[in-house]
Amino acid sequence: MKVLRFGLIAVTTLLLLAALIAPRLIGPQVETVLQQQLSQQDNIELTGYQRGWFGAEAVTLLTGKDGKTETQSDIQHGPVLFTRSGLKVGALYAETRLTGKQLEPSLRHQLEAYYGPISQVLDESPVVVETLVATNNRVINTLHLQPIDRNVADQQIQFAGGKIQLVTDYTGQQQDSRFELGEFVRMDGHREALYLQSASGDFALAPTGAGILQVKLPLVRTNNDSGPLELRDVALDYTGELVAPKTLKVQTAINLPDIQSATPASSLTQQLHLPAVTYDDLHHFLYSLLLKPSAERSWPQVFQRPLQAQQQLDIATANGPMQLQLDVDWKGIPRSQRVQNDKLFWLDSLEGSANISASEQALMQSPLIMQASALKQYGFLLEENGQLTMHLQLDKGVLAVNGQQLPADLFVLALMGGL
């Protein structure tokens, strides 16, 4: 028994010594690899680093489109790591937070819209990134979105929090990654303005943008001046393929199989294909059309970049189906070119076609009734057996409607009901 007891004490002592000594041995090696990786990232600058026996503290600046964001990372050296989810074995564990001292303006605006003013207290950072370098050729990065329970004037926001987990091997090759978002509710006074049931998704995206993304939203509810809208079992899919240096082929699909609203629409499917779009052009259109407020949008500036796209939109309604097909080859407008016509300047740089097919009853009872009535009145929408169709072909300002050439400005006037 004494021998066994002595053996257990000896093993325990060795393990304790290993746990104390290993961080000092592992730490410098991990730091060397970490600094090498950071040096390869043009948008990441290491501005401060302080090493201790069991870990380190790093301060970095992340450069975005509109400015820089400062973060601080608390790093533990393995093999024994104290993580948010308990004890783990690995080479390194880090928690990264916003310092609040320097924040890219657009990022600050988006975060403060939900979380309020960003504090300079690290523990109050609205986002936390966990990094675990495990021993099984896995690097697990988890972005935590902190919960929200905020009241401002007549508006209330509640969010159960969420996380995005990115898993790679030691070379950076992505593995099984996913995200989970908790319930989100926004109340305007006593009216529910937006409700999102807990959502989830899977993704495998390379830094190049190549890969897949799948999102599922069980329930989305909104309520505004146009009336209530409820969507069930929403599915969003993205596929990106690198076809040339810094150039992607992109395919997206949106499926809304169950729509309940004040309109007759009961389901919607949209597919978008971009055969070749550069990083700069894709970022330009996403930023200009999705992130920039419409009041600040300059259309001549938006249309500076080229874009090729094919889209198909199918809508099922209680009054029949509607379909829109678009094939667009937009050449872009050079910055040096002066825009002569504020309304139709874009026609001279556009090539493409459009096909519209819809049940007459569905189109005449849709929000597009004014435009549909005008187009039908002037013979642009052709009717046969209760079905309305129209084919448009545009080639650098030359417009053909159902095979007949027509001045583009006259068609736009008819579309707006101005003839």
Image (cartoon, grey):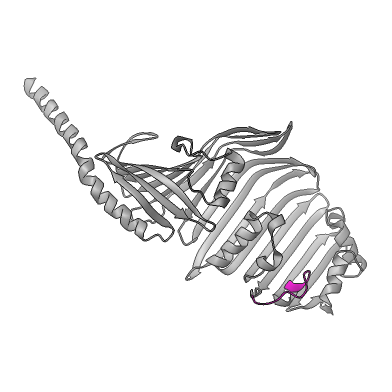
Magenta extent: 336-346
Q: Is residue 349 magenta?
A: no
- Using the rendered view, name the quadrant where residue 94 is placed: top left
Q: Determine which quarter of the picture holds residue 322.
A: bottom right
Is 342 a magenta residue?
A: yes
Classify residue 387 as left or right of residue 216: right
Total numbered labels:
0
Horizontal arrangement in the rendering, residue 161 relative to residue 389 (left or right): left
Residue at point 49% right, 59% down? 211
Judge whether residue 386 can be spotted in this image. Answer: no
- Report x, y in % for residue 119: 51, 38
Q: Can residue 146 be seen at all in this image of the molecule? A: yes
The residue at the point 85 percent across, 71 percent down is 411
Q: Is residue 66 above or below residue 390?
A: above
Residue 40, horizontal then vertical, whole percent: 37, 61
Q: Main secondary structure of the magenta part?
A: loop
Q: Position of residue 163 (x, y in %)?
A: 49, 41
Image position, residue 237 (x, y; %): 58, 54
Name the image quarter holding residue 278: bottom right
Q: Is residue 19 above or below residue 340?
A: above
Q: Quadrant of the C terminus?
A: bottom right
Residue at far front of view? 101
